[in-house]
């Protein structure tokens, strides 16, 4: 559904270790950076229209009601993203595990990045 998302962070120096760790654990590479911008994934184009892209931009953080969910290739990636995110300055907002209220195989973990954005890492695959 989403083509790309931009997330505001007030301090790129504080945000970068968290986002680099979480995106790498989910398999989304860092594709560009500067003091005020950081990009992950791959931009869509005419030859690759299904690509997805995330950018961080220096600016106001999202309201706490905002929620960003990132697809993980498997449950191990959810576990890894949560662990490295917590180690890289994020805070636990829900440890990895099944969330059967959504569907029987919904496996997710929740974090807050250093700016307070709520991040979900989710895998929909069966174990």
Image (tube, helix red, strand yellow):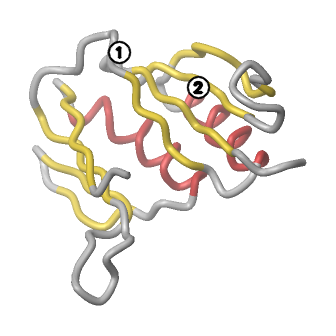
Residue in the foreground of this view, choosing between 93 and 125: 125
Q: Residue at x 78, y 48 (%)?
A: 76
The residue beneath circle 1 is 116
First in sequence: mark 2 vs mark 1: 2
- State how far apart marks 2 and 1 are (Cα): 13 Å
Q: Is residue 66 left or right of residue 95?
A: left
Instruction: Give residue 114's position: percent from left, percent from top.
Output: 37, 21
Q: Is residue 90 left or right of residue 14?
A: right
Give the answer, above or below, for where 53 lies relative to 111: below
Give the answer, above or below, for where 65 lies relative to 87: above
Q: Residue at x 52, y 43 (%)?
A: 22
Instruction: Give residue 33's position: percent from left, percent from top.
Output: 21, 58
Q: Residue at x 48, y 50 (%)?
A: 23
SS category of the residue bearing label 1: loop
**Mark carried by residue 107:** none
- Please tell me how crowded label 1 is: few (under 14), some (14-19), or many (20+) other residues with Cα within 10 Å: some
The residue beneath circle 2 is 86
- Toward which corner of the image does residue 45 lie, by quadrant? bottom left
* Most distant residue in the right direction: 127
Instruction: Give residue 90's position: percent from left, percent from top.
Output: 49, 23
Instruction: Give residue 14's position: percent from left, percent from top.
Output: 30, 29
SS category of the residue bearing label 2: helix
Residue in the foreground of this view, choosing between 55 and 1: 1
């Amino acid at each position: 559904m989403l083509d790309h998302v931009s997330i505001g962070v007030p301090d790129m120096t504080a945000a970068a270790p968290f986002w680099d760790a979480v995106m790498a654990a989910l398999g989304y590479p860092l594709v560009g950076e500067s003091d005020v911008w950081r990009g992950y994934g791959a931009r869509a184009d005419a030859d690759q229209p299904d690509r997805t892209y995330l950018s961080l931009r220096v600016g106001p953080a999202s309201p706490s009601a905002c929620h960003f969910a990132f697809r993980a290739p498997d449950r191990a990636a959810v576990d890894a993203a949560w662990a490295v995110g917590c180690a890289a300055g994020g805070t636990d907002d829900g440890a990895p595990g099944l969330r059967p209220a959504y569907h029987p195989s919904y496996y997710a973990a929740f974090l807050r990045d250093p700016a307070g954005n709520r991040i979900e890492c989710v895998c929909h695959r069966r174990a």
